[in-house]
């Protein structure tokens, strides 16, 4: 179909991680109540030896006996406080044990996934995949046919990508023999990257060394007064529509452009409150010539950003925010497609460490962000078309985390570019997100009310070009 099908939601307020947190909190509450009951039982037991009660034994022996029996029953009887405390404590321990078992099962599943990756590497899956692609092209099919085939079987990309680093590492180790360890250590000391990659981040960082480091040059391109740029966003679909608008304009010599949108409203105290939305388009030109990097949204940046290395494009975004007038405490949302989403989350990760800007929300569309950690102070909404190959380039499924809401949907056009297209594929999915009552999505939308709630009285969108000095 041309739009988005039913949404599959993972993580967030209704995800497994949240359920584990709730179970753990319930277990702690049960233990607390049990301790309180034991304290109450001790206090009640003190009644038995209270001098005022003991004096009644002389004046009213039968009444004293009844009182003592009632207190003993309330404290240690079959329905007493001590037995209730014991049951609650046992329930609490049982719930804690269940959380441990569930978490262990998740880790075991991840372990089996990792084991499968290494087995596929040992079986030479990347080499087999390359050979099969070569045979496919050699038998009269073109690259577009190969892309269509991969769109039909996107899981192949996951397996090949995930198994390539250990495959290359084992091949290099076999070639270097006893020198593999010393060579790897020397290479790490000189470059900060392993010569024998074990993870996709390792491999991306290794390949990123082929590209000269960039140096951002940020220039203002004025104010965008078009209707879509001047309209206050009220929903996720509005966010993606504004991103699609910038993406359509950021082509050719303008392909390095991003925009920074200032939203002004009256705060609860009547004073002006300001929040910001930043739109980051994806790669337009791979710039395969490593010696000519006019723009920073190229394959070199994709590699270094995926690896978690310092990114010149992230630094360019930082400079654009400074030029736009974003203040350190003002809430910022970063919205990005493809590489733009990867850069957005890496920027949020950096700002969470250095405190330069207060990024509270990130929205990504078709971005390989499953391996990128989400800071505790950030709420991520990640849209991913099941048949889009780009978000699969990290070779990992999105983890279940309370501050990471992943939206998986089906939009099969049987074309690599169309399946990844922002306007054609991801904008309809964003509209579907706005209509979906899923608790995780509802919680995310509520958390983003600073940016999406009505009441904005002024919107000003400035455009910034991020070029490369190198």
Image (spheres, rainbow, N blue to C red):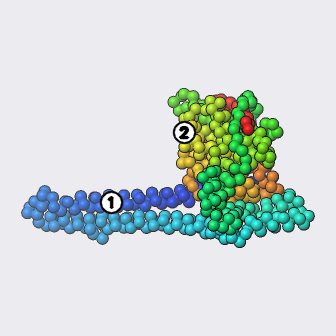
Relative to 134, say whether 220 is above or below.
above
Relative depth, front residue between 193 and 104: 193
Residue 44 is situated, as x and y percent measured from the top left of the image, at 23, 60
Relative depth, front residue between 237 and 284: 284
Callout 1: SS: helix
Q: Residue 355: give its label.
A: 2
Check the image and name the residue furthest to the left. Answer: 58
- Spatial CA span between label 1 and label 2: 41 Å
Can residue 404 be seen by looking at this rendering?
A: no
Residue 314 is situated, as x and y percent measured from the top left of the image, at 66, 41
Q: Residue at x 69, y 43 (%)?
A: 213
Q: Residue at x 59, y 65 (%)?
A: 110
Callout 2: SS: loop
Name the mark nearer the viewer: 1 or 2. 2
Question: For this view, does 185 lie left or right of residue 171?
Answer: left
Image quarter in which the N terminus is found: bottom right
Question: For this view, does 119 lie left or right of residue 74?
Answer: right
Residue 146 is situated, as x and y percent measured from the top left of the image, at 83, 61
Image quarter in which the C terminus is found: top right
Check the image and name the residue furthest to the right. Answer: 140
Q: Disc 1 designates what residue? A: 35
Q: Residue at x 56, y 60 (%)?
A: 16
Relative depth, front residue between 212 and 435: 212
Q: Residues within 10 Å of mark 1 (few under 14, many from 20)?
A: some
Q: Residue at x 46, y 59 (%)?
A: 24
Q: Quadrant of residue 281?
A: top right
Q: Quadrant of residue 136?
A: bottom right
Q: Mark 1 or 2 closer to N-term?
A: 1
Question: For this view, does 257 lie left or right of residue 202?
Answer: right
Dot 1 and dot 2 residues touching (CB under 8 Å): no
């Amino acid at each position: 179909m041309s739009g988005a099908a039913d949404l599959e939601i993972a993580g967030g307020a209704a995800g497994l991680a949240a359920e584990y947190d709730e179970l753990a909190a319930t277990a702690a509450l049960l233990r607390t109540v049990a301790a309180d009951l034991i304290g109450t039982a001790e206090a009640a037991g003190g009644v038995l030896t209270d001098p005022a009660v003991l004096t009644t034994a002389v004046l009213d022996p039968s009444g004293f006996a009844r009182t003592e029996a009632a207190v003993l029953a309330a404290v240690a009887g079959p329905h007493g406080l001590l037995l209730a405390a014991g049951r609650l404590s046992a329930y609490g321990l049982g719930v804690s044990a269940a959380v441990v078992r569930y978490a262990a099962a998740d880790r075991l599943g991840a372990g089996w996934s990792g084991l499968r990756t290494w087995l596929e590497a040992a079986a030479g899956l990347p080499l087999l995949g390359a050979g099969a692609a070569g045979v496919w092209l050699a038998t009269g099919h073109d690259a577009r046919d190969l892309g269509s085939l991969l769109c039909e079987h996107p899981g192949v990309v996951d397996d090949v990508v995930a198994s390539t680093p250990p495959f290359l590492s084992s091949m290099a180790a076999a070639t270097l023999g006893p020198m593999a360890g010393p060579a790897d250590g020397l290479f790490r000391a000189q470059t900060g990257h392993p010569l024998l990659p074990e993870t996709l981040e390792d491999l991306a960082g290794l390949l990123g060394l082929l590209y000269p480091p960039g140096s951002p040059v940020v220039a203002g391109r004025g104010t965008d007064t078009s209707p879509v740029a001047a309209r206050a966003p009220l929903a996720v679909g509005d966010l993606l529509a504004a991103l699609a608008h910038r993406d359509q304009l950021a082509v050719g010599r303008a392909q390095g452009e991003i925009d920074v949108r200032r939203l002004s409203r009256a705060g609860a105290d009547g004073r002006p409150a300001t929040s910001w939305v930043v739109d980051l388009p994806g790669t337009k030109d791979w710039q395969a010539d490593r010696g000519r990097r006019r723009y920073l949204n190229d394959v070199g940046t994709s590699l270094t950003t995926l690896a978690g290395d310092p990114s010149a494009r992230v630094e360019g975004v930082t400079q654009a925010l400074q030029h736009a007038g974003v203040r350190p405490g003002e809430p910022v949302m970063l919205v990005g497609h493809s590489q733009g989403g990867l850069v957005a989350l890496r920027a949020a990760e950096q700002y969470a460490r250095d405190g330069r800007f207060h990024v509270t929300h990130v929205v990504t569309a078709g971005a390989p962000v499953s391996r990128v950690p989400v800071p505790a102070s950030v709420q991520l909404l990640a849209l991913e078309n099941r048949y889009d190959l780009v978000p699969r380039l990290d070779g990992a499924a999105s983890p279940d985390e309370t501050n990471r809401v992943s939206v998986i949907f089906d939009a099969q056009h049987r074309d690599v570019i169309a399946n990844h297209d922002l306007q054609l594929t991801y904008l309809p999915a964003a509209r579907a997100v706005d209509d979906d009552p899923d608790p995780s999505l509802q919680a995310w939308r509520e958390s983003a009310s600073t940016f999406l709630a009505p009441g904005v009285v002024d919107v000003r969108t400035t455009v910034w070009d991020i070029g490369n000095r190198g």
